[in-house]
Amino acid sequence: MESNGQNGQGSNGASATKNISYIMNTKNWRGPLIFILIISILGVGMIGLQTYIDAPPMTGFKDATGTVVIDQNTIERGQEVFHKKALMEYGSFFGDGAQRGPDYTAEALHWITVYMNDFYIAEIKLKTGKEVDLYEVKQINEKVKVELKQNAFNKAENIVSLSSAQSYALQQLKKHYTDLFIDKNTGAGFPPKNYITNREDVADLASFFFWGAWVCVTQRPGSSFSYTHNWPYDPLAGNTPTSPVILWSVLGLLAFVLACGIVLYFIGQYNQLPNKFFKPPKRDLFTLERVAAFKPTATQKATFKFFFVAILLFFLQVSSGLFTINDFINWMSYIGIHITNDLPVTISRSWHLMLSLYWISTCWIASSIFILPILAKKEVPGQLRMINTLFVLLFILVGGSLLGMVLGPLGLMGKWWYWLGHQGWEFVDFGKMYQVLLMGIFILWGVIVYRGIKPAFIAGQPWNLPNWIMYSVIGIPLLFLSGFVAKPETNFVIADFWRWMVIHMWVEAFFEVFITVIVSYLMVLMGLVSRQAAIRVVYFATILFLGTGLLGISHNFYWNAKPVATMALGSVFSTLQFVPLILLTVEAWRFKNMPKIAVGDVDHKSLQNFGFPEVFKFLVAVNFWNFFGAGVLGIIINLPIMNYFEHGTYLTVNHAHAALMGVYGNISLAALLFASRLLIKSGRWNDKVVNFSFWSINAGLMLMVVLDLFPAGSIQFKAVVEQGLWFGRSHDFVDYGIFNSLTWMRGIGASVFFFGGVIPLTWFIVSRANALKTKATDIKQMDEAIHEEVDEKLMEEAVM
């Protein structure tokens, strides 16, 4: 027993331990988790049901004479053109998509408003023969606002009656986009010449945009605001923030402060636990000697080809990002390369996004397979064949889908564009057939993990780390099923709901849980933390991430034609998503000092002999970017009133880059390097290259945020507040002035990131393909220390 004063123990420590004994006891975990899952599933189910019930109709439109000028089929064909040509990778619709080009709903709404004002001004001039004065202009503008807000939808006929001014605006809108894509297309920037050559396709596309603008401005039946809560902001069209937007922003902030107080209270008690709770009992650090003596099994050695491909995909992903930036500022023209017409931004950005998912997923799949023999302490027969099959399927998926993402938007896939080309949804860009293949890959991965991890399951202990790995692996493909619901003709509002069911639930719920499991297990394997502490961290993180993340999906639907109830859920739960990240920040000091805590009273007098210092750096970076990138840069855009003006601006791009690369990128590289450190001969390991790459990647990412993404987003936010989203996303604003200059500034961070980080790390991993250790002939040769049974019963009792 330790003395009362040691390690913060004594009466206060005992009291704190007693106070949290309930939540620290694994026997009490099932109830809270089931409760949160039931509430979350019911909440998400309600959002889904409301999506179908309250979705704006994909209706036809008729003019004042009763002639149908747009029918439902026309809108569906326009939506198909929008997806087939991957326009969501240049601009956005309802704010969802890329942020460099226009938001087509905001742009169409503004032009419709301008054209309607022009119509009435011309009408008065024709009647009076005089120029209209300022007073008459204001009267006309008010009249236009009233017309735009009136919902003339006839449900029985499924058609909307347009005024003469609205019919005129429709014709002018069609002319505007025909000029843009065909008649006045100079090929300077996007769209390149001949990107869309069929005039009917452009007319259908304009009709789809007209419908989107109608959804944004006309009043929802029974409400005083539009289907999208008067988003986008455009005072000329009468779109300004509604009272629910302001009310639920205040209530969401109140819930956040209250939740922070509750969580910090429990953290205060949790932190009074002695260090021995976190320190691995009777186990040394994973030393350099153990690393050198480690011999990989056949299945572990087979994972290196996954990491080899993953680092090449990382290189290709960043390279495609450089090509994407070229479409904005044409920097390659200064070195004599002109490719903007041959490689449209819709293709390069599709690659940039999907390759990020590919290389990150490949690292996660490979790392989870790598640790299976360590968990099970055996090699399961038949695993190697299944792992090699999985690699072949991944190779087909990546190669085939990347080719399809090029041929589809260029019109070279014909009727097969949807199945083998480009689906046209951001982050779900690949053809549907490859989506089916990816589901098969996930299932095979799940089978491999289950077969490999099954021997490590202990009856009556559902919360062990092997179980958590299995739970998270099951959750990822389960949610991927959502991506198979929508079809090309599905109402955009409904289809986008199912897209977010995949993206958000992965990124802000189950991926967060998976990351916590992987980080925790890597800490255990490196000898930095006890299993019992890791299990509890995983459980608490799961409770917080699922409790806030599942219902937090609703913040993606503020302006996507959902009712007020969805906004209410989003304002509260999306704000609460920052709470788990506060927990990570409070734990940052302990996490940073884990190696010192682990050394404690064991034989090693310093950390010089620690076998994974480079891996640990990447894990610390995950904690930092989880707080700063996902948390700080995320919460500033989550409140409804802030999001109302911010949605569709570079502040979203800022958050996305910092969170995706900062969190998921760093954890993927940590997993890659952990396995590689044990696979590559110690004499061929180069810690200087890895360390230099670490600092370059993270410093480069921070420079991109500080020099471009955040200031550009802030300036764009100001422009939106002053004039409207249409202006903040316009060609005149984005491609000129300080916004354009900041894009050039991003090149500083991108250069540090790419040349100092990506290239050296890629070279290092690729060049070590011929420096792998010989495989173990017996499982015990892998690492004898892993096979030592560790009695952690005392540690379990210490927190009861």
Image: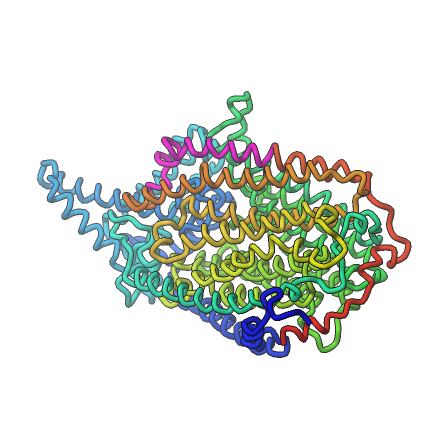
- In reply to whether residue 404 is colored magenta, the answer given is no
Quarter the C terminus occupies? bottom right
Give coordinates of residue 459: x percent, y percent. 74, 76
Picture quadrant where residue 16 is located: bottom right
Q: Is residue 492 visible?
A: yes
Image side of residue 333 versus residue 440, left or right: left
Picture quadrant where residue 190 is located: top left
Image side of residue 302 versus residue 109, left or right: right
- In reply to whether residue 754 is colored magenta, the answer given is yes
- What's the residue at 55%, 67% (across, down)? 270
On screen, 287 above or below 39? above
What residue span does the magenta drawing correspond to? 727-755
Image side of residue 344 versus residue 725, left or right: right
Q: Nearer the viewer, residue 20 or 770?
A: 20
On screen, 225 above or below 703? below
Give coordinates of residue 410: x percent, y percent. 55, 38
Prevailing secondary structure of the magenta residues: helix
On screen, 529 above or below 609? below
Q: Nearer the viewer, residue 457 or 167?
A: 457
- What's the residue at 81%, 54% (across, down)? 299
Q: Nearer the viewer, residue 155 or 667?
A: 667
On screen, 175 above or below 142? above
Q: Is residue 486 visible?
A: no
Give coordinates of residue 760: x percent, y percent. 67, 34
Q: Nearer the viewer, residue 760 or 290?
A: 290
Image side of residue 333 versus residue 769, left or right: left
